[in-house]
Image: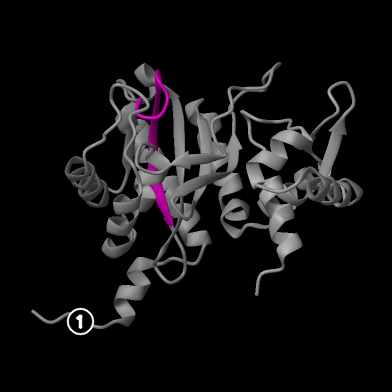
Amino acid sequence: MSIQSVDRALQILALFSHRCPTLGVTEISQAVGLSKGTVHGLIRTLLRQGFLQQDVPSRKYRLGLKIYELGIILAGTLEINQKAAGPLTQLAKSAQLTGRVAIWDGDSVIITFDVHPRIRAVLPFRFGPRVHAYCSAMGKSILAFLDETQVNSYLDRTPLVAFTATTVTEKDKLLEELAETRRRGYALDREEAVQGIGCIGAPVFQRDGQVAGSISISGSTSRVLGEKMTEYTEELLRTAAEISRYMGHFPAFADSLSGPRPN
């Protein structure tokens, strides 16, 4: 059963993004199809609970610190983040590349944890937190290990839009790449999501053998996919296997329990 006022409040919160960090009452009213009076009432409740705050100079609204607080709690309590933090941080520092954890969420992947090898004086370029699966190494390394029905359903409802000249936009070609990803155990992003950025991703598995998410390392294309790519890939695969073990995935042990396979 849907509670209308809660549903409307959540619709308002979902309007905010990197591109639209602040919104006025008129903009919100038009976006959700509600009267300004109704929107004012919902905004007052969200302000009181800390989910919105008002930008004084513009009189517009932005997400409140309660959202940030809940996000920190969620990120800190996700099992894959807890298990991946140590190994991925070590990998990112060793390779001097950005490391990320991502999980599947509907029609895309969500970056739940990232680590930068060096302390930065300014905020880095923000990639995510929601990323298209078909053009990212994080997403493709998850898609490759989903059920075939899930993958086909995803591709049927997802427009394969080109973000760069190298984005794969043909379904058959993408399916071939996912098959290759399953075979070798890792996925590549050759500047398919962001120009100049290359990425290698690998799946992380959970206790039941299902894919739990993925990890990746990324940086300039010339570096990530250059002469040290084989070394980076081997380190990434070892790290993904280590995290999977921490998640309770022991494939050799599971195979031994299933007994000998028929010829």
Instruction: Pinpoint residue 222: horizontal percent, then vertical percent.
Output: 35, 17
Under mark 1, the amino acid is Pro
Q: Does the magenta segment cover residue 81?
A: no
Please indicate whether residue 110 sits to the left or right of residue 135 in the image.
right
Q: Residue at x 51, y 37 (%)?
A: 91
Horizontally, residue 31 falls left or right of residue 65, namely left
Residue 146 or 216: which is nearer the viewer? 146
Q: Residue at x 51, y 25 (%)?
A: 96
For disc 1, the marked residue is: 260
Q: Which residues are magenta?
A: 191-204
Total residue callouts: 1
Up-down relation of residue 200 to residue 221 (above or below):
below
Q: Residue at horizontal 34%, vertical 51%?
A: 157
Viewer-closest of 1 and 143: 1
SS for dot 1: loop
Report the quarter where the N terminus lies. bottom right
Q: Quadrant of residue 79?
A: bottom right
Residue 103 position (above or below residue 164): below
